[in-house]
Image: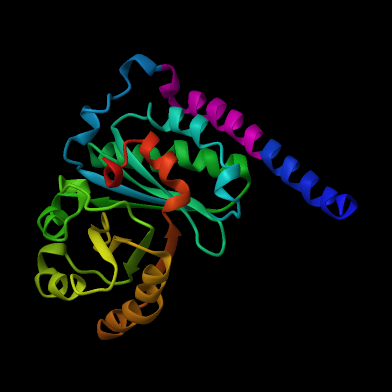
Amino acid sequence: MTHQTKPQDQKRISQRKKIGDTVAAVTTANLTLGGKLVMASTAPKNGENQMTPEAFVYTELQISVPFADVPWQDLNDQIDNEPGFLNKTWFSGVGNNSVGGIYSFDSVEAAQHYCTTFFPAAAKAFGVAQTTRVFDAAVVSDASRDMGSPHFGAAPTQAPGAFVYTEVQINVPFEKAPWQARNPVLKQQKGLISKLWLSGLNTNTLGGVDAFDTVENARAFAVDDFPNTAAKLNAAFYTRVFDASIAEAASRGLHSPYYT
């Protein structure tokens, strides 16, 4: 039995070392890109992180890492020092162990800065491809408040068990989006706790981050329900399901509104 598990143990040790080296590389790269990590004294405090966001950022690394092996404590310290950062909810992909998250920033400019400096440096250090998206928070505030989004001050009713990220390849200014008709339908979705609407910066794509009570209900929404919605819009779409429970401690460490 020991002989059979040794290669696997060595692989995990090697992977942990690679991730640790990546954290160090990201630190060095980020200092080169702007020296933001030395600004610990100016990092936002917990209370300040509750201000209304002006932009959201979605990220995902094309990597497979069990979340237990992600050095989130070290990464949290770095992310918390990024200019304009308010909060982050960590994402861990169901079925593929991808790593990412949904972030709030106090300005669009700060969100763009993060997507063009820190996160690409992290992806390069890992040696993997990456996805980033920037969204205008102001235009979705009313629609998201109506869906109980904690990003806009709603008190969480329960800790989420899973998240679903959606994005539809369509160009619709959010003021013309049919969210008033869509929200009542979503409120009947089994297991849905809250929804954060998303509107793509410069693209007007429509999407959201939906918090569910269980992975099973989240998967049912992503696989069974949402494709029908996209079909009615005659549009291609993007869905991801994430396990919320395994990343809860990491998310709490970055002031995630889902756990306050």
Q: Is residue 125 above or below residue 100?
A: above
In this rendering, would 87 be left or right of 54?
right
In the rendered image, which quarter contains the C terminus? top left
Q: Is residue 260 visible?
A: yes
Place of residue 94 in the rendered image (x, y in percent of width and height, measured from the top left):
50, 62
- The residue lying at 9 percent from left, 70 percent from top is 180
Depicted 14 relative to depicted 227: above or below: above
From this viewpoint, is residue 206 visible? no
Left or right? Give the position of 246 relative to 201: right
Q: Is residue 54 or residue 221 the one in the foreground? A: 221
From the viewer's perspective, is 15 left or right of 81? right
Task: Tell me where residue 10 appears, x and y as whole percent.
Answer: 80, 44
Residue at 30 percent of width and 43 percent of height = 259
In the rendered image, the vertical position of residue 206 relative to residue 19, given as above or below: below
Q: How many marks?
A: 0
Q: In which quadrant of the rendered view does residue 192 lie?
A: bottom left
Viewer-side residue, 155 vs 237? 155
What segment carries the magenta color?
Answer: 19-38
Outermost residue, front side? 1
Occupied quadrant, residue 25: top right
- The answer to whether residue 176 is above or below residue 133 is below
Q: Residue at x 36, y 62 (%)?
A: 165
Residue found at the far right of this picture: 3
